[in-house]
Amino acid sequence: KSEQAMRAIRNATESANATDTRRSSSSPPSSFLNRIVGYFKAAFLLIAIGYLFPFSKSFSWNCYRISIASSVLSSALDVFSKHGRPQLNMEYAALLFQDQTAMVVFLGLILLFTKPYL
């Protein structure tokens, strides 16, 4: 009986490894997405500096909106590279609500549609 249990465990791990191999082959190209995320982070830093210097009110407001949008896009690409293509099921939603990067995306979307002042 112990040999049957060991065979069942071995078969289960082999099938899980085969599933992981198939899943990793369908994942997006991470090096390309990482390069794009790096560009968004650099743009975010430059625009955030532009927001801090008081050139004019409209310039600061536009820099604020652009910095939030670039942060949302960068985080969304990071979530896409971690979890793959968005799916409409409860498991994917549970993964997103447990991921801190997805929370940055949701918070950024909220900030994007609000005013930057009280």
Image: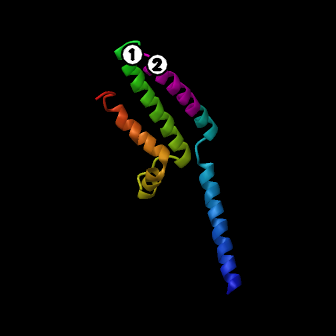
User: Which residue is depicted at the point 49% across and 21% down?
Assistant: 49
Give the quarter of the figure containing the N terminus.
bottom right
Residues under labels 2 and 1: Cα distance?
8 Å
Which label belongs to residue 59?
1
Give the quarter of the figure containing the C terminus.
top left
Q: Is residue 103 above or below residue 13?
A: above
Disc 1, SS? helix
Residue 46 within the magenta-colored segment of the rendering: yes
User: Which amino acid type is marked by label 1?
Assistant: Phe
Q: Which residues are magenta?
A: 36-54
Query: Disc 2 marks which residue?
Result: 50
Using a 10 Å C-alpha cutoff, classify the residue at mark 2 as few (fewer than 14 neighbours), some (14 to 19) or many (20 or more): some
User: Which residue is depicted at the point 41% across and 15% down?
Assistant: 54
Displayed quadrant of residue 13? bottom right
Q: Is residue 65 left or right of residue 24?
A: left
Q: Are circles 2 and 1 on residues that touch, CB within 8 Å?
A: yes
